[in-house]
Every structure is written in C-alpha cells, then in structure tokens.
Amino acid sequence: MSGQVRKIRMGMVGGGEGAFIGVVHRLAASLDGEIELVCGAFSRDAENCKRTGQALFLSPERCYSNYAEMFEKEQVLAPEERMEFVAVVTPNHLHFDVAKQALESGFHVLSDKPATFTLAEANALEKIVLSTGLLYGLTHTYLGYPLVKHAKQLVADGVLGKVTKVVSQYHQGWLATPPTEDNKQAEWRLDPKTAGVSCCMGDIGVHAANLVEYITQDTITEICADLTSTVEGRVLDDDGCVIFKTERGAKGVISASQICVGDENDLSIKVYGDKASLAWRQEEPNSLWIKYQNAPSQLIRVGVGELSSEASAAIRTPAGHPEGYIEAFANIYKDFAKQVCSFGDDTNVNAHVPGIEDAVRGMAFIENVVVASKSSEKWHTVVLNAEALK
Amino acid sequence: MSGQVRKIRMGMVGGGEGAFIGVVHRLAASLDGEIELVCGAFSRDAENCKRTGQALFLSPERCYSNYAEMFEKEQVLAPEERMEFVAVVTPNHLHFDVAKQALESGFHVLSDKPATFTLAEANALEKIVLSTGLLYGLTHTYLGYPLVKHAKQLVADGVLGKVTKVVSQYHQGWLATPPTEDNKQAEWRLDPKTAGVSCCMGDIGVHAANLVEYITQDTITEICADLTSTVEGRVLDDDGCVIFKTERGAKGVISASQICVGDENDLSIKVYGDKASLAWRQEEPNSLWIKYQNAPSQLIRVGVGELSSEASAAIRTPAGHPEGYIEAFANIYKDFAKQVCSFGDDTNVNAHVPGIEDAVRGMAFIENVVVASKSSEKWHTVVLNAEALK
Amino acid sequence: MSGQVRKIRMGMVGGGEGAFIGVVHRLAASLDGEIELVCGAFSRDAENCKRTGQALFLSPERCYSNYAEMFEKEQVLAPEERMEFVAVVTPNHLHFDVAKQALESGFHVLSDKPATFTLAEANALEKIVLSTGLLYGLTHTYLGYPLVKHAKQLVADGVLGKVTKVVSQYHQGWLATPPTEDNKQAEWRLDPKTAGVSCCMGDIGVHAANLVEYITQDTITEICADLTSTVEGRVLDDDGCVIFKTERGAKGVISASQICVGDENDLSIKVYGDKASLAWRQEEPNSLWIKYQNAPSQLIRVGVGELSSEASAAIRTPAGHPEGYIEAFANIYKDFAKQVCSFGDDTNVNAHVPGIEDAVRGMAFIENVVVASKSSEKWHTVVLNAEALK
Amino acid sequence: MSGQVRKIRMGMVGGGEGAFIGVVHRLAASLDGEIELVCGAFSRDAENCKRTGQALFLSPERCYSNYAEMFEKEQVLAPEERMEFVAVVTPNHLHFDVAKQALESGFHVLSDKPATFTLAEANALEKIVLSTGLLYGLTHTYLGYPLVKHAKQLVADGVLGKVTKVVSQYHQGWLATPPTEDNKQAEWRLDPKTAGVSCCMGDIGVHAANLVEYITQDTITEICADLTSTVEGRVLDDDGCVIFKTERGAKGVISASQICVGDENDLSIKVYGDKASLAWRQEEPNSLWIKYQNAPSQLIRVGVGELSSEASAAIRTPAGHPEGYIEAFANIYKDFAKQVCSFGDDTNVNAHVPGIEDAVRGMAFIENVVVASKSSEKWHTVVLNAEALK
C-alpha cells in the first residue's frame, strides 16, 4: 500500500479498437487500483471511440470525438471530477500536438514513446513543459523492471568498476516479411508520414540506447551507424547497427532489428567493467547476472535477498512468482501517479519517471543515427538540438 | 475487451496489512478494470481493517469489522450497489465458515485455496454450493497460465499419445530454517490450528496434484506417500513425496518441499506419453516444451503461433512481453467475473474457473496423503469422502 | 602431463562391431595417450573380432577368439609386452566370469557396470579381488566429471550444512516404444538372460543412486520402491521410483525411466542442506549451481576460479571450452592407469576410481529395489549380502 | 571405425611445458587412436623439449632441439617410420617458417591458426602449398563441431531462405586486467613481435569471421571496423567491433573482445534469413536452435534425429552424452589423418579440413580490419592480397 491518498483520474488519447499499446497502458494504469480512467478520445472514428469507451465502462459523455474537445470539456469540470493527466497513445506523428495541447490546457502528460515525431518537436516540447511547469512522463517501459533499476544501482555503486564496454541488442522478427494487409501496426510504423524518419531505430533501437544510458548513467556522445531496409520496397529502416563511444570513455554496440525471424522481443544488455560485468534480458526479466573475473557468477533474482530500494519498491510478489511487462509498465504509471498526487505539495516524491530530458535524448538518438547512417564518415558527434543537426 | 457489460462488485474477507495473498488477489482483481472492490472485512483487528480500507480508497462505512456484519449489511444495500461476490483470503481455518455464510447470504464466493480446513468441511461446502445454486470458485492460480491451458489441450488432442508417466514438483526453500519471530506467514502455516493437518502438502503439494489432474484430465486414484518434518520441533510436514497411479493407468511422482534452500517457487510438471512429452515450469511460464522420440524438440511460446482458444484468451500482450503470476491470477478473476456477470442469463459463459469439485478433490488429496504417509502399507486408495477415510 | 612413466597396456573383452559402450571405453582409454590397447577378445563371432582388431590396428595374433584364450596367451608374453589390465565391456551376464578369470590370471580389471549379473556374484567377486590383491575398477562414468567431484567436496566441507533432502533423476526415452528389430542394445538390456533382474534400475537407476551416495558420502539404508513395465509385453522394468532414507537422516527420491520420450540422457541431482543446496545436470556438466537462503545463487563453472584439487586434476582445457562425457570417462581410465602404473610401488597414488565396494553397493541397490518393489510393505531395509536378501 | 588402414605418424613443433594449445592438439590427435605422435621439437629450450617428449613416451632421439633438425632427420628415416605430417603449435610469428620448411621437406602440415604472422606470408604460403602439392590444414577448431557443420547444411539447403543478417560474437574476459607476470599466454599474445598486428581480432575475432563465412558459405566483402586497446599501456587491440556486408547482400556485425569480464569462451552466431533463423553457441555446442516466423522454435540436439551426413560423421556418442571442444578439435585431426592416409590414392576422401584458402582469408580479415579501424572512412573493401592492402 503506497500511501497515495486518492485515486488519480486519467484520460486517454488514442487506444481505440485495433490498437495495441493503448490496451497495455490501460492494464498498467489499472493494476494497482490507484488510477481511474475517467475519459478518452480513443479514435478519430467516433463509433470506434464510443465502443471502446463503453467496453471500458466510461460514461458516454466522457468519450470525446477528438482530443481538442476532450481538453476543452474536461477543463470546465469540477476539480475533483476532471481528469488530472492524459495518457498519449496515438501513432507517433500526433504525440507532440496532443502533449502540447494537454499541457497548455493544464493537464499533466504521460506519453508513449517516441515523445514526438521529430527532434525539433522534442526541443519545442521541452520548452512547453518547462514553461507550464506541469509534469511530463515518458513510458520507457523497460526502466520499470526492478532488475533494470537494480542494475543501475550496481553500476553507480562501483560493483563493476570502470565501465569499459556495453553491448545492447533489441531484436524482433515481426517485420521480416512484407506485412499482410490488415496489419495496422506494421502499416503505420513503416510509413514515414506516421512513424517519422526511422522505423526500427525509432521504435526499438531507442529503447536499447535508453537502457545503455540509464543503467550506466553515462551518455552516448559519438556514433558510427548503419541502417538497412532489408525488405524490398521499404523506405524506412527495419534493421541497424550503431557502434558508440560514451562521455566517460566506454565503447559499445547496439544492434536493433525487426527482421530477426523468430526473435520475439529480445531486448538485452551486457555491461562490462574492469571488475565485473552484468547481463540482463527482457524476456527473462527477473534474473540479473553478475560475473566476476575468475570467480563464480552470481544470479540475482527478483525477490531474493537485498535489492536496491528503488528495485524493491518495484516488486509486488515474493520470489519465484514471475512479474513481467505489464508490471514494469505499471511501475511507470504508479510512479507517475505518485508525482501527480503530490504535485504542488512539499512532499518529496522520489519516484523516478523518465521525463522530458529522456524525451529529447531519445529523439536526438533517432535523428542522429539517421544522419550518421547516411554519412561516409565513420564517426558522428551526437547533438541534442535539431538546429545543430542540419 | 471482453464484452462484459458492467464492472462486477467485489467484497473481500481477510487481506489486511501484513497479509500476503490478499494483496495479490486485489492486484489480480484490479488488472483488467472489470471488477471493483466495494467493501471488505480485512482483519479482526478493527484498526488494521480501517487502515487497509482507507489505503484502498473504500468508503469507511463499507470497511466492516467482521464478515458476519459485512454479509448482513451488504445484503440490504440496493442491488446495483451491493457486492456481488466475496473473495475469501483468510487463513485456512476460516475459509469454510466465510464461504458458508457468504453463500447463505446470497453472495457468490471466490476462495483462496485450500477450500476448507478439513475434507469433512469440503464435503459439507459442496452441499451448500449445490443447494444455494450460487457460484463457487477456487483460486488454483497456476491453472490461469496460458500454457497450462494449452498443455491440457495438447494432451486432450492426443499429441502425447497415451500418457504413461507424470512428474510434478513443487519446491520452495523458505521454511528450511526455523522462521524468525515476525514471520506471520510461517507461523500460521506451521500451526495445525490455522493450517490444518498438513503444511507442505496442504499449501503447495496440492497445487502440484491439481496440475497433474488438470493437464492430464485424469484422476489420481492410488498413492504411496511419505511426509517429513525436517526442521526440529515441527508438528506438520515441511516436505513430502507421493508416488501415484491414475485412473487411466499412468504412474507418477510428486515431490513437494518447503525446505529446498534456494528454490523459490519451483513448481514444474513433465507429462510423458507414448508419442511425445511436455514440460512446463512456473518460474518460466511463457515457455512450454514438446519433445518427440528422436526428433527436434519444440519450444512453444506465449504469443507465438496458434495456441488453443482457451490459452489465447488468457494472453494480454504480444510475444516476448513476459506475463507472469499476477496475470495468471487475474485470469481466474476475469473468468469468475464473467460467470458472475452472466449469472442467471441464458448466455453460455464458457469460462473455466476451478470450482467446488476441485475444492473437494484438493482437500481429499491432502487428507489422503496424511493418512497414507502414516500407514506401513505401500499403497493407499484415494477416497473423496471424509467418512470413508476414517 | 601426469608424471606417469610409461604407457599402460590394456586388453579388452567385448566391444566388437555393433556394440556401443566398447567404443566409448576405447576413446576414453585413448584420449590422454597414456594407455595402449594391445589385445582384445571383442566378440564371440571370430570374424567380427578380427575386423574390430584390424580397424584398431592390432596385430592379428593378439585378436583372440575368446577371453579364456586371451588370458592364457597374454600370461605367457614377456612382462613388458603383455597386457596389464583388461577392460570388460561385454553384456552384463558375462561381467563376473570375465573379471574372475582375469583376476585369477593375474590381470587387473576395469569393468563396465553393473559389476556382475547378480548380487551373489558381486559378493563372490569381492572375495576374489581381496584374495588376489589386484586392482578392480568400475566405470561409474559420471563420477569422472570435475564438478561431480567438486560437489562431493562442497558437501564434505560443510558448505551445504546438514544434508536434508536429495533428489536424483535419470530419465531417458529410448525405450518408450517397442524397439525395432535391429536394436541390439535394446534387445539384450530387456532380456533377463543378459541384463539380469532389472532393466531400468540396473542400467541407469543405479547411476543415480551411486551419484547420491558419492556426492553426499552417505549411504542409502531404507527404500520404498515401485518399478513399472510400461510397454506391453516387457518382463523387466523400464521405469521406476525410489523414495529413500540415508544413514545420516536425509530423505530423498530417485526417479529413473527409459520411457521418458524426448529425454536424452537426463541424469541430474539436487542436494539440499540446511544452509545451501547444489544442483548438477549431466547434459550441462560444466555448470554447478550453489543456492543460498535469500541470497544470490552462484554458478560454478569448470575452469573458473578455484575448484577442489580432485576436480582441478580432472580438467583438460580452459574455461569455456566444454568438456563432456568422453573426458569424464577418460578420467576414470586415467586414474586407473595411474593406479596400475604405481601398483606395488610405495608411491601413494591418490587417484579415485570406484572399486569393488561400489560394485557390491550397486548390485545391492538393484536387487533390493526389485525386492522392495514387489513388497506390499512401504519400507524395506537395504542389505548388501545376497544371502540376507532372500 | 573409420576405415583408415594404418595409424598416421605425426610430429609436433611447439607445445612444450607451459604451452596451452599444444596439449589440446595432442589430446585431439590422440582421441580416436588413429594418429601416433612419433617426434617433436617442442621448445627452443632443449630441457623443456626433452622433458615434454619423455612425458609423452617418445624415444629421446626423436625429441629434436629445433624444427630444422627435425625435418632433416625425419626425412631420412624409413618411409614406414618417419613422420607423415607436422602439427604446428608455436606462437604466431613462427607459423610461416615452420610450415614452409616442413612442406619443402616433404611433410604435410596441420597448423594452428592464424596461419601466418602477416597476410604477405599467407600469400607466400599459398604458393608453396600449391607448388609442393602437399596437404595443408588449419585448425579452425570450431568448424569441427557437428552442429556447426549441420548449420552450414541447413543454410545450403535453403531452410533459412535468403540470409539477411548475421550476428557473431566472440567474448572472453581473461585480458580485462593487466596480466600477472607469469602469464606466458597473455605475454606473447599482446606483443606485436610474437602476435602480429592484432591481439583480439587475430586471436578470436578471426574465428567469429570464419564461422560467419563457413556457415553461410558467403564472403565478407566490406567492413566498417573499430578496434580498441582498453587496458592502459597496450599496443594491440583487446576489443573490437566490425559491421560487414557480404557478397550475397547480407549485413552483419562481429563483436570480439578479450576484456568482457566473466565471459569464458563465448563464441556464438545467429544467422537470420527471410524464412527462418538459426542460433548456435560454443559453450553449449550440442544445441542448435532453428526459429520460425510465428511458429514454435525447434531445438536440434546432437544425436537426436537425422542430421546432415557431415555432422553425423562428427559424432562419437549417443544423444545426451555431451561432446565438447576436444572432440571438435579431434574431428579436424581425424579428417586430416584421413586425407594423409589416402594422399596420392584415387580414393575420394571427402573430409573437410579448413585449408590454405581459409588461411589466406583469415589473415586478410585480420589485416583488413586493422587498416579499416584506422580509417576515418566508414566502409573499407576487403582485399586478399597484401600488396593491394598497402
């Protein structure tokens, strides 16, 4: 029991029938019973929106036909009734505008990633977040796993010594063949108009990069990148590799791919230091390996022994009761709800949620990789500002 | 979206601060947003009950000081307001009385296992369930895993051929040493007054037996049992082994233990047939192995390819997004809510929830094992009626 | 380099074309270049014997048509030429007579297991070994694995605390269906005339039991056994389960089976103590798990860090260069060759090779299990003398 | 039994006390009993050479003080007595000269890798091999694993469809810290005078590249490389990453490192096609995964079911009896011995041993990577001739 004093009221933009990630957001929001979905603009298709709201037991008058209307009408509801934050789960090209309008209407925002369609938008969004002073969170889901949090702490505590090499991989196989016609997911993700400048790096490579920077608390500063459109006829990348250097002198490599037939959602990371190394894999998220030089390896398991306080707070069941993706996702929601609940208070809510800085870094990673991939020069210096990238 | 037309209203008995399983029940009930906790009698300690209810955002007047009061007062609320079913999450010795009173007050019951304190109570409860005509469900959680459901289907479809041998194991290590003083869980589970005639077999061995019978859809008819109280001073078993024969002629062995240091919640099952075998392990629940005679093994994964309809209905995310214990538990709740929702309708709700028959079989397994363990005869025939066991 | 001062000369009885285990014995003997095969009586079929010897580059005059002849003729060769020990790799029913004649002709014996056809023969063989004063070794191959040796040391060092429970399993699947006609292996192993009183327990269950006693250095004293002939028409067991108690008060269970479709050679053991537990599995022999109460598990790997001296001496390559079954087998041969080399010296050769005591215990296990399985009493006390068993 | 008609006589250059790889070569040569070590020039240190020969039971007069002497004296022995081929297991800088002199003295050569010190030497060696018409083999050990051979066949058979991406990794950790003084291995491998232009890529990266080309039967044509000297004070690389393109249009990445603390000998490869993918890992060499698009994965195991004929011929024991590194190494020796045995015959010995072409490709890979790593251009076209590289 978290000490939160009331249920937080959430609205949702996107996530109508046929969407994938909206459902996951709702499961994540619902799990701990501390957030209540009160309204939604689930689809541009009014019928879809209505059906979705009904299936979610919403009152029909709070199923809005578009997000502009939602922000307008919710604003005028009584403070104890109106939504407090909005979950943004539309296709990528709308993220910025929804977040912008929400913030400008006085609502906190928890957005699916990537934060925006372009780095320029991310730069602009950062200004809006700062000027409104409202909360902005980004669902970099994988940071919600307890052992990812613990891994970060182990590196911070010097258990690995000086970090020398990082290998991160995010392999999926679902785009290995031309998608069948009715695959909405594949359609919008491969279309530059809805997905942006990158498919594979934008959708999953950015998670791998984010994991590298989060766990090491270091920054990718130089990259050598190679993107590929493997399947004929594609405009955007479905595969890519990035060799990188970090601010503190580590080297590393990120391999991201959506054409790795038979790989499901194979995100993994290995961090090597001069004393020890760690390894974690998303598909077996409750195990974290620590390996030493010429000594037995250790298998750290969720719920077994002492973990870092941040990791411990992210666990719901005893050892051996596997927790997974929805629980990790719910940890982001739970922490964001805590921030919303104490917003404006003096209470020091020490709940980590990836925020606008991660949003900018993520968009910068994507656009820098695209630029670097096109260059015949080996190395490219990462910049965070869209102006500087041109 | 399940097609359920309204949120189902749930009350809870047990699950106050300091309890473990009550929290899990609430997460499971909450996940899909289709059940609403409306009242509770969480603890005999009024303060604990109140604090628990408050943390769950309940109105104070629906936090009852005991379950008798709860049933009485909820009965007189308006039909669209009062709870529809009660989740029973108290220590074992109260399960029967809570369920009995709830049913006799007109409420459906979803009970933690074991269903009752004794087989005699289970026999009595069966009569009450039948006479009231109300719904009774038992949270045999592990049946909620998609691949357990799929395993059952594979056996039913004859993929394994004739089943010849079953090996099931449930090993934990948390009782390997005398528990520290403040371990409430250990205390009541090792005390015959609250736990019943068995600790290890009653708490976890019964899950292993249930899994055997569920997946094979066969019945354990004869057993040879040996229970052990490993740690000095214990009255109840903390370890045991059961060799068994089934109605259809398979043999098998169940090893259950709470003194297996370092084992977390290691429930596993292997079913061998004359054509193929299957293997599943709770700590990696999204993988199911099928092995063949002199041919490559197959790894079936949640979300990959075609699964049985029952399994498919129990999955919430795409392949590679691990789902775990809470999701399995939530599947039991989701299915029970569906049954409650359509109760009295003509709709044919085909949602499997373990029921009163499983309750009786579970209690029979426990008491028969205890009797068999004490016997110097090798084989003991399992009986389902407490009278016959004496 | 082992310090052995000359190649040891070996003869072989059995192992002609079509045999399985003879080939493995020869690979094991050959690996370290310290043993030389000088003669053989490979088959009762003279042509087979000759062809086998030729393929092994033996001189034709040392390919004998039967073992009696071999012992007779080798005896009269010059001491520096004649064989020093004989490897016995015939079907089970001949083991005793070959070993007996070899010992009585002055040759050391290294025998495949089981040592003899009956416990009575094993009792008799023990007397012959003692009276001749010659070396007798038994190829309990699995004791040759480095991490099995290390596991024994960990238990001896008290790392596990007091051992409370042992679970050992040996599952194969190759007899799950009636064997095809040309399967010589299956034929003689299922025939009481060549295999003895048991197929499954005699062939593989005995390995599991041996592993239990070796690693714990404890003794199985009481058993509750159940053997099964799963496939129709079989006289001997192809599956079985043994619950046991040990001299020092541990409990345990052995599941052995040859009808576990899809299992290859799945021998594994888990030893639980009140401080820690260990787990080892033959199919991944270079890994040994140590698990603790509420602390990270340790993975011990061959070649990584400090192992016991006995284990270290059994390793040939650096970490990560997997060694397997043939290397384990070769360790038995290597150690036996050392014993032969220093036989009669004052040098203290501290090379462990399972000997006549293990031979008797192995045969006793098999025959006691068969007797116990037939009894309607649950528990049976293990006896080592064939007279006492009747 | 292989049908080889006599034991093949081998000499060895290098492999005295303190050497690692020489011991492995001898185990590999010895395993199948088809090769006899008859002479050696094991060390420049005459005492070491003598002691080594003695421990190997060689006659003192065939322990030569240097390889020139060995070739000279063996040449004049009777044909049925003198060595037939020489195993070259010296440090890298001597490989060329030993091989050259051996070939020019009329002896076949089986060399440890890398074949030579420089690409120029490899180009020269190729001419010598062709002009002498003698046999030249290279111990690319990992090609000796049965499932590597089977993987090659699966790709050739089109099981994977068109290969699109290959990820190969070879991670070790033994050079993560400055080596202790008495580590001979580390010393010569990090010294450009004995190791050549590269440590990590030359020692292990080249194995990863070789595995890529062998399994896909495709050719790496363009590379983007980045080498690192992680530990201070090192001249040569201890870590590196290579992105590559192949002749048939696949992309890939090789990560090789000797500073991956806790990694043992972690060579692995994943090959993705448009129909299926495969994955193999050296530390679990008896397992090969085949994964399909949205269908269960298959685990292929050594000894289970039908494998390619080349793979089958490389297996010595039944399923579940793990074979490892020495067996893989022995397969190279066994096949080379077959070639030697039938040299000059009309018999068509279809035994694959990596040869002079692989030798040149290996050296070319190493030197091209070093050049590419130094370039500021992203892509570099691989050339096979030392002249062209300058």
Image (cartoon, coloured by chain):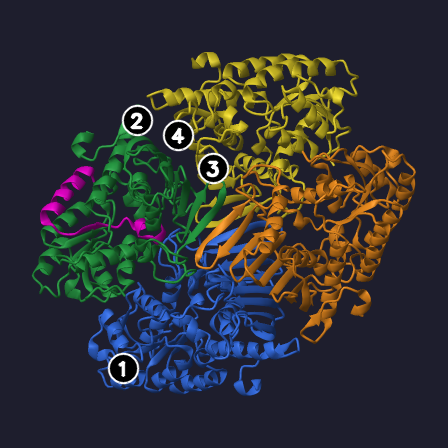
Chain colours: A orange, B yellow, C green, D blue
User: Is B307 placed left or right of C89 in the picture?
Assistant: right
In the picture provided, is D130 more to the left or to the right than B130?
A: left
The residue that mark 4 highlights is B230
Could you say whether the residue bearing mark 3 is in a helix, strand or loop?
Answer: strand
Between the C-alphas of marks 3 and 4, the distance is 29 Å
Q: Which residues are magenta?
A: C118-147
Q: Secondary structure at mark 1?
A: loop
| Mark 2 residue type | Trp
User: Relative to the observer, which residue lies in front, C47 or A314?
Assistant: A314
Q: Nearer the viewer, mark 1 or mark 3?
A: 1
Real-space CA distance between mark 4 and mark 1, rounded to the nearest whole angstrom:
66 Å
Of residues B64 and D86, which is closer to you in this image? B64
Local packing at callout 3 (Cα closer than 10 Å; few below 14, some 14-19, many 20+) is many
Q: Nearer the viewer, mark 4 or mark 1?
A: 4
Residue under the image location 33 percent in, 57 percent down: C312
Mark 2 surroundings within 10 Å by alpha-carbon count, few (fewer than 14), some (14 through 19), many (20 or more): some
Residue holding disc 1: D65
Q: Chain letter for mark 1, please.
A: D
- Chain letter of disc 4 in the image: B
Tell me which numbered mark, 3 or 4, is placed earlier along the sequence.
4
User: Helix, strand, or loop for circle 4?
Assistant: loop
Circle 3 sits on which residue? B271
Amino acid type of the residue tagged 4 in the rendering: Thr
Q: CA distance from mark 2 to mark 3?
A: 27 Å
Q: Judge depth for marks 3 and 4 and give the one in front.
A: 4
Amino acid carrying mark 1 in the image = Ser
Q: Nearer the viewer, mark 2 or mark 1?
A: 1
- What crowding class fits label 1: few (fewer than 14 Cα within 10 Å), some (14-19), or many (20 or more)? some
Q: Give the distance between the C-alpha atoms of the residues marked 1 and 3, in whole angstroms.
A: 64 Å
Label 2 vs label 1: CA separation?
Answer: 69 Å
